[in-house]
């Protein structure tokens, strides 16, 4: 199983993803592909995301049962914790008074 979620993605990228994957909700794409095809799709996302952001998750023989990667700016950042990938939240951007 493969899941890709995009935010603020260019229409062209969303259209390309819809060719390969089923868009089950706005910006949420799912499918089942080989590692090679998954990597090719992810390279397309990385090259085309622009100012948006995306996350990919896929089934893998890990303790969690899946792996994931991200591209673009987002408050959630993957971190390795003794070989187990977790998500760290970055602080909110401080706002200027007034």
Image (cartoon, rainbow, N blue to C red):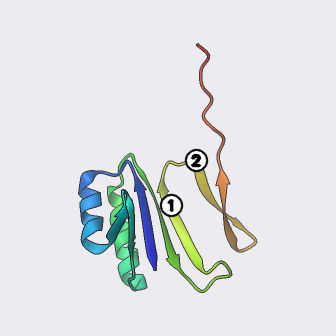
- Residue displayed at 50% across by 48% down: 73
Marks 2 and 1, the one that precedes in the sequence: 1
> Disc 2 designates what residue?
75
Q: Position of residue 72 (x, y in %)?
A: 46, 52
**How many residues crowd mark 1 within 10 Å: few (<14), some (14–19), many (20+)?**
some
Please identify the quarter of the rendering in which residue 66 is found: bottom right
Identified at 38% across, 83% down, the residue is 33
Q: Quick one: 65 or 42, which is closer to the camera? A: 65
Per the image, label 1 sits on a secondary structure element best described as strand
Q: Secondary structure at mark 2?
A: loop
Residue visible at 62% across and 16% down? 97
Residue sitting nearer the eye, 88 or 39: 88
From this view, report whether residue 94 is shown above or below residue 43: above
Question: Within the image, what quadrant is residue 93 found in?
Answer: top right
Which residue was labeled with disc 1? 70
Residue 90, above or below 64: above
Left or right: 97, with 30 as reference point: right
x%, y% of residue 51? 38, 45
């Amino acid at each position: 199983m493969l899941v890709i979620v995009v935010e603020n993605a260019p229409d062209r990228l969303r259209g390309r993803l819809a060719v390969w994957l089923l868009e089950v909700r706005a910006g949420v794409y799912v499918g089942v592909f080989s590692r090679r095809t998954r990597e090719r799709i992810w390279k397309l996302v990385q090259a085309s995301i622009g100012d948006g952001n995306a996350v990919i998750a896929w089934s893998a023989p890990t303790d969690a049962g899946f792996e994931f990667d991200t591209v673009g700016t987002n408050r959630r950042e993957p971190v390795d914790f003794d070989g187990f990938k977790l998500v760290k939240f970055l602080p909110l951007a401080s706002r200027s008074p007034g």
